[in-house]
Amino acid sequence: MTGGILAAVFLLALFVAPPPLWLAFVVVVITLAAWEWAGLMNLAARARLAYAAATVPLALASQVFELSGLAPIYLPTLLFWLLIAPLWLYRGWQRPAPWLGLILGWVLLLSTLLALLLLQAESPYLLLAAVGIAIVADTAAYFSGRAFGRHKLAPVISPGKTWEGAIGGAMAVALYALLLPTPEGLGKTVMVAAALVLCALSVLGDLFESWIKRRAGVKDSSRLLPGHGGILDRIDSQLAVLPAAALFWIWVK
């Protein structure tokens, strides 16, 4: 039931809300995610609230920039997901020092906020298509893994994930990309290739949050969403997918 309510709220905000309300919705989501992130960094209750509160002006300050000119903001996030996060997981590093973890949280969360604003401003359908990549990948991976899963993808971090599931998710995403409308001047081959990169990033986002939670000794990022954990548990994949999708869209334009 909670999942259906979350989907309905998101779709209403995406397609019906005027720009100020969409901005408010996104800022609230990112602020709650920041509060959860601070908890995973082992901050005390007051420090968590302070971190979340500081996220609000940072998020609103992004509006003084022309969103389409913010490609450099997405680059650090993309480099983190492509280079640092895989090495982090492979090496089994501990949680970062609190100050470094808090900076990382802002980089990941604020770049996601900007991506949400940019893609929705271009077209609500564009943002929905980008969000759908992680959803399709996760759903297909779940069913493929249950049916064919034999080889663990990351047994220490997420024992339920398998290589067979990941391959099934990638195949579903490739089909999803083929069914999407192709922007003018962009071939289906590029669309599918970009979607597969985003699919891989969605898996990294999921695994990275699972690793951080494991190191923090918790199962969920919070209990804000009954039966679904916290905000970060719902958007972990999107933290990796959306900034990369925004950067790709800027390049396409």
Image (tube, rainbow, N blue to C red):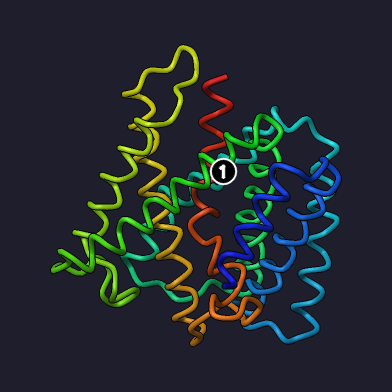
Q: At 73% across and 53% down in the image, what residue appears? A: 26
Instruction: Determine crowd level at label 1: few under 14, some 14-19, many 20+ residues with C-alpha closer than 10 A.
Output: many
- In the image, residue 52 sits, relative to residue 79, either above or below, namely below
> Along the horizontal axis of the image, is 170 left or right of 177?
left
Q: At 51% across and 85% down in the image, what residue appears? A: 218
Q: State the residue in front, 223 or 140.
A: 140
- Which amino acid lies under the numbered mark 1 shown in the image of this protein? Pro
- In the image, residue 41 sits, relative to residue 121, either above or below, namely below
Furthest-top residue in this view: 185
Q: At 77% across and 80% down in the image, what residue appears? A: 47
Instruction: State how many labels appear.
Output: 1
Residue 157 in the image: state x and y as whole percent. 34, 74
Q: State the residue in front, 5 or 82.
A: 5
Residue 142 in the image: state x and y as whole percent. 31, 64
Picture quarter with the N terminus: bottom right
Residue 5 in the image: state x and y as whole percent. 63, 65
Q: Label 1's element?
A: helix
Q: At 27% across and 56% down in the image, what residue appears? A: 166
> Which quarter of the picture shows residue 187?
top left
> Which quarter of the picture shows residue 101?
bottom right
Q: State the residue in front, 207 or 7.
A: 7
> Along the horizontal axis of the image, is 151 left or right of 235?
left
Q: Which residue is mark 1?
A: 243
Q: State the residue in front, 94 or 188.
A: 188
